[in-house]
Image (cartoon, helix red, strand yellow):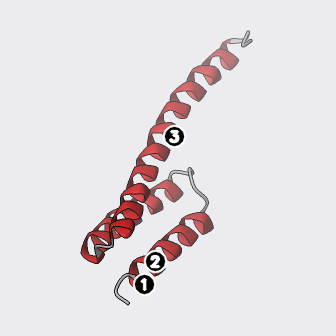
Amino acid sequence: MANTPQSKKRARQNERRYAVNKARRSRIRTFLRNVEEAIASGEQEAAIAALRAAQPELMRGVSKGILHKNTASRKMSRLSSRVKALSA
């Protein structure tokens, strides 16, 4: 349990930061799920649009410290290759 004023403040800050990060992570997952659903439906135009919307969200997650840079790049690469395969 936090006893000193500094540790109490840090606990409050951690709670706020946790809530913000949780919301950001959830938002990123929603965008990724939209891409997955578009790929599953087989509609390439919808998948391309969903991927274009998801890319800035992933990069925003990197800049905010929620995702590692390579993780976001890997996710984008794998999704884009799956979207590209829809045309074949």
Q: Residues within 10 Å of mark 2 (few under 14, many from 20)?
A: some
Q: Assign a secondary structure to mark 3.
A: helix
Q: Is residue 4 above or below residue 36?
A: above
Q: Assign a secondary structure to mark 1.
A: helix
Residue 74 position by quadrant = bottom right
Q: Which quadrant is home to the C terminus? A: bottom left
Q: Which residue is mark 2?
A: 82
Along the polypeptide, which appears first: circle 3 or circle 2? 3
Residue at the image point whose x is 66% and y is 12% from the top? 5
Residue 31 position by quadrant = bottom left
Q: Which residue is mark 1?
A: 85
Q: Is residue 45 above or below residue 10?
A: below
Q: Which residue is mark 3?
A: 21
- Position in image of residue 54 (x %, y %): 38, 62
| Label 1–label 3 contact, CB within 8 A | no
Along the polypeptide, which appears first: circle 1 or circle 3? 3
Q: Assign a secondary structure to mark 2.
A: helix
**Nearer to the camera, 43 or 50:** 43
Alpha-carbon span between mark 3 and mark 2: 28 Å
Three-letter code, disc 3: Asn
Three-letter code, disc 2: Arg
- Position in image of residue 77 (x %, y %): 51, 76
**Nearer to the camera, 68 or 8:** 68
Q: Is residue 49 above or below residue 23?
A: below
- Pick out the residue farthest to the bottom: 88
Residue at the image point whose x is 60% and y is 64% from the top? 71
Three-letter code, disc 1: Ala
Q: Residues within 10 Å of mark 1 (few under 14, many from 20)?
A: few
- Position in image of residue 13 (x %, y %): 56, 26
